[in-house]
Image: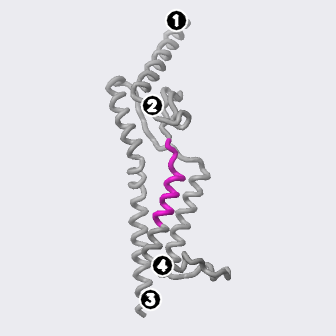
């Protein structure tokens, strides 16, 4: 009877901690992205001072679909493995294979094993979902791509690019009005 209560309490504790930690995943993503978010906010503030009428928007750049699907599968697989560790089921016995040593260790050290699976899986999921994108467009025309260039533009580079683009746009608009 005591063993059932222990398993039940571990299961409840595991489910509760997973719910709390997956609810916190978005804040972990925010912390990870806070470097880019901070740069975006600094650039936005500086650009608003220089160009008060400009519209600036920021959004997340999604990774390719295969990475999203792999990350989603890994997230569900992580929950399955943690559940199997907590309830003490041996999935290897179902297929007639001897359990590897790490599984035996996990059964003897359930809390550590669950934490290891959770954090290792989250590390891989975050890597799959991270694009490192910092893309800049002006009037729906790309003017900078971190994915292509490999680095963020300096503020001076960005201002120079925007000045050149705006001068070209003004020049193109005045030429269009003169021909009309």
Residue 144 in the magenta stretch? The answer is no
Image spot of residue 163 (x, y percent): 43, 19
Numbered circle sitting on residue 178: 1
CB within 8 Å, label 3 to label 2: no
Choose top left, top right, bottom left or bottom right for residue 4. bottom left
Q: Nearer the viewer, mark 3 or mark 2?
A: 2
Q: Earlier in the sequence, mark 1 or mark 2?
A: 2
| Above or below: residue 146 compared with residue 126 | above
Q: What residue occupies the far front of the structure in this picture?
A: 101
Which residue range is magenta in the image?
118-132
Q: Nearer the viewer, mark 1 or mark 2?
A: 2
Q: Main secondary structure of the magenta part?
A: helix
Secondary structure beneath disc 3? helix
Q: Nearer the viewer, mark 1 or mark 4?
A: 4
Q: Which residue is mark 3?
A: 4
Mark pair 1, 3: CA separation:
85 Å
Viewport quadrant of the C terminus: top right
Q: Nearer the viewer, mark 1 or mark 3?
A: 3
Mark pair 1, 4: CA separation:
76 Å
Q: Which residue is mark 2?
A: 153
Q: Earlier in the sequence, mark 3 or mark 2?
A: 3
Front-most of residues 13 and 93: 93
CB within 8 Å, label 4 to label 3: no
Image spot of residue 81 (x, y percent): 53, 72
Q: Which residue is mark 4?
A: 86
Front-most of residues 54 and 10: 10
């Amino acid at each position: 009877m005591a063993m059932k209560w222990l398993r039940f309490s571990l299961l409840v504790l595991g489910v509760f901690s997973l719910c709390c930690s997956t609810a916190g995943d978005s804040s972990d993503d925010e912390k990870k992205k806070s470097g880019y978010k901070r740069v975006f906010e600094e650039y936005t503030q500086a650009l608003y001072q220089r160009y008060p009428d400009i519209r600036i928007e920021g959004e997340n750049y999604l990774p390719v679909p295969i990475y999203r699907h792999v990350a989603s599968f890994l997230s569900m697989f992580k929950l399955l493995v943690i559940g199997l560790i907590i309830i003490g089921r041996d999935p290897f016995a179902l297929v007639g294979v001897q359990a590897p040593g790490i599984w035996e260790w996990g059964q003897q050290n359930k809390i550590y094993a669950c934490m290891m699976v959770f954090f290792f899986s989250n590390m891989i999921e975050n890597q799959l979902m991270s694009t490192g994108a910092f893309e800049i467009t002006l009037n729906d025309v790309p003017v900078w791509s971190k994915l292509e260039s490999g680095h963020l533009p300096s503020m001076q580079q960005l201002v120079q690019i925007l000045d050149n683009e705006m001068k070209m746009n003004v020049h193109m608009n005045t030429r269009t009005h003169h021909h009309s």
